[in-house]
Image (cartoon, helix red, strand yellow):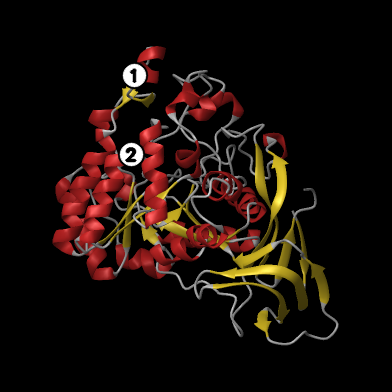
Amino acid sequence: MNAEDHNALILRGARVIDASVGRDEVADLFIECGKITDTAPPQAAVVDLPGCIVCPGLVDLHVHLREPGQTHKETIKTGLAAAAAGGFTFVACMPNTQPPIDNEDTVRWVLQKAREAGSCTLGPIAAITRGRSGRELTDFEALLKAGAVAFSDDGDGVEDDRVMRAAFELAKKTGAVLIQHCDYRDMSSGGVIHLGEVSRRLQVAGIDPCSEEAMIERDISLSRETGGRYHVAHISTSRAVELVRKAKAEGVPITAEVCPHHLALTEDACVAGNANNKMNPPLRPRADVEACRRGLVDGTIDCIATDHAPHTAEEKQAGLLRAPPGVVGLETALSVAARVMVESGLADWPDLVRWLSIAPASVLGLRRSTLQLGELADLTVFDPNVEWTVDPNRFVSMGRNTPFGGWTLPARVIGTFHNRVFHYRTHL
């Protein structure tokens, strides 16, 4: 990525999509002193963007930046640079670091590191429980004051009913949202991939989908009883989608996200044993994938999130049985989602923009900039007509563990305008 400060900028001839107000038109955008104006500023730099789409900056509410503690996998600086390369101007990082993000000092430290990086805004997600142990709640009020944007023990679900009920009560009191990694370890322990046809064929332990569904069912009951806001991370099964659909119909304050890999791939991708197809929750059968796509279209699932999870090449080369689960996704999310949802005819570009910008921001209760006059310019530019081939060796992220290496995908990110700086790709 390269970056240039622009006090005055004209983005000329692009398709402008702002899902927050239903705007979709070919127009010029004028930026002066970091804000969108109604007239062309004098001595402005001009960027011609015919055929490109300009939209509010993309938001990812589920990434793993590995810092503190595992900087051999990713750092806040490299992770945020990868986010910008993928078109994101805001990402929220999960707390399963070493040490975990479970106190105010760590929240402030993470925010400072992000400010130093500068390429993308970061919102720390703090742990629900101290040490992510599942036993004692963190201080929600203090963590929110320090800058936390949500709470999760991601990497693990909070299994103790008493603790989770108390978390929901505290979420209701503070207005926080709980993001749950839905997985009962006793049901999934030792599992490698989805429990089904492929796991039986490979003769490996499977992860029972009930481990996800049972926790969602329990949490919906707690959310219903307490009024605490609940967000389902990386939803992956048809029954889970139906549980969320029914809960929303009942008025439960619930939202959900789906990952690009759970929209694009089935358990069949694991047949060859490539550990870059190993993630948690695992890839599911075709019926589950189709249910997730339908859930996104009909509004049951609110948004798309990457669950960007970098691992070293050595870890992933350990094979399907021993490799850690997780894949990177910041630099491919827009394009994979476009392939699955737009090129298939299931959705159009305004839908995709909404799922990747306004919707995830809304889940976190963030006020993100729109493309309206007087607003701070915080936007993403991509060309929907350009196809590109995924080469993990050219990723900005330190992680290369993608299931999409070698895929030819649509929609190439041109750059982002964020904090008065135009970050653009130096190679396309």
The circle drawn on residue 205 is: 1
The answer to whether residue 41 is above or below residue 236 is below
Which residue position is annotated with label 2? Answer: 237
Asked whether 254 or 121 is in front, the reply is 254
Position of residue 387 measured from the top left corner of the image (x, y, whole percent):
71, 45
Mark 2 surroundings: few (<14), some (14-19) or many (≥20) residues within 10 A:
many
**Is residue 234 something that shows in the picture?**
no
Residue 249: image tag: none
- Residue 60 drawn at (x, y percent): 50, 55
Specify whether 58 is left or right of 290: right
Q: Amino acid at mark 2?
A: Thr
Amino acid carrying mark 1 in the image: Ala
Q: Residue at x 69, y 87 (%)?
A: 38
The residue nearer to you, when weighing 64 against 333, is: 333
Q: Residue at x 32, y 24 (%)?
A: 195
Is 23 left or right of 37, judged from the image as shown? left
Q: Nearer the viewer, residue 156 or 307?
A: 307
Q: Looking at the image, which residue sits at the far front? A: 345
Where disc 1 sits, the SS reads: loop
Q: CA distance from mark 1 to mark 2?
A: 18 Å
Tell me if 189 is positioned left or right of 377 in this view. Answer: left
Vertical relation: 244 (above or below) 34? above
Give percent across and percent down for residue 103.
Answer: 38, 57
Residue 196 position in % (x across, y down) = 33, 22
Q: In terms of image quadrants, where is residue 313? A: top right
Q: Which marked residue is nearer to the observer: mark 1 or mark 2?
A: 2
